[in-house]
Image (spheres, rainbow, N blue to C red):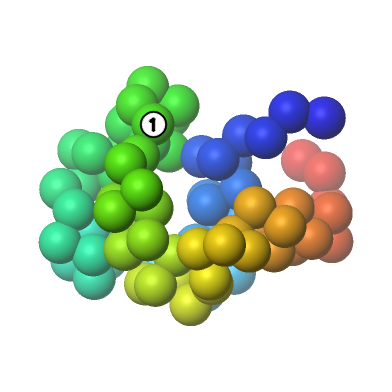
Amino acid sequence: MTFNLGARLRAVMEINNISQYKLAKLTGVSQSAISDIMAGKKSPTVQTLQKICAALHITFLHSRKYITRLQDKMPTI
């Protein structure tokens, strides 16, 4: 199984009812950068990923494991 950051962040955002616009406002990262990260067009810097994790209330070091667990609990679309 490959790690799809955009899809997994989207799952956490949906659970927390946070739009890309709101995530951009919470993090100070541009909405276009958030969109590119979500689409897999760009990889976030460590600093950007830390900001995103903080806004979504997940830890940076455990974000992959946490997001994977959330993804496993969500129904397949």
Observer-nearest of 73 and 69: 69
Q: Is residue 44 above or below residue 58?
A: above
Q: Spot the residue most to the top.
A: 41
Q: Is residue 53 above or below residue 68?
A: below
Q: Is residue 16 above or below residue 28?
A: below
Residue 13 appears at what percent x and percent y?
50, 62
Is residue 17 at all visible to an observer of this figure? no
* On-image quarter of the N terminus: top right
* On-image quarter of the C terminus: top right
Q: Is residue 3 left or right of residue 50?
A: right
Q: Which residue is mark 1?
A: 43
The quadrant where residue 19 appears:
bottom left
Residue 7 appears at what percent x and percent y?
58, 41
Observer-nearest of 71 and 46: 46
Q: Is residue 24 left or right of residue 67?
A: left
Residue 34 appears at what percent x and percent y?
30, 44
Q: Amino acid at mark 1?
A: Ser
Q: Is residue 4 left or right of residue 72?
A: left
Residue at the image point whose x is 29% and y is 51% from the top:
48
Residue 71 appears at what percent x and percent y?
75, 53
Residue at the image point whose x is 32% and y is 41% from the top:
45
Observer-nearest of 28 and 31: 28
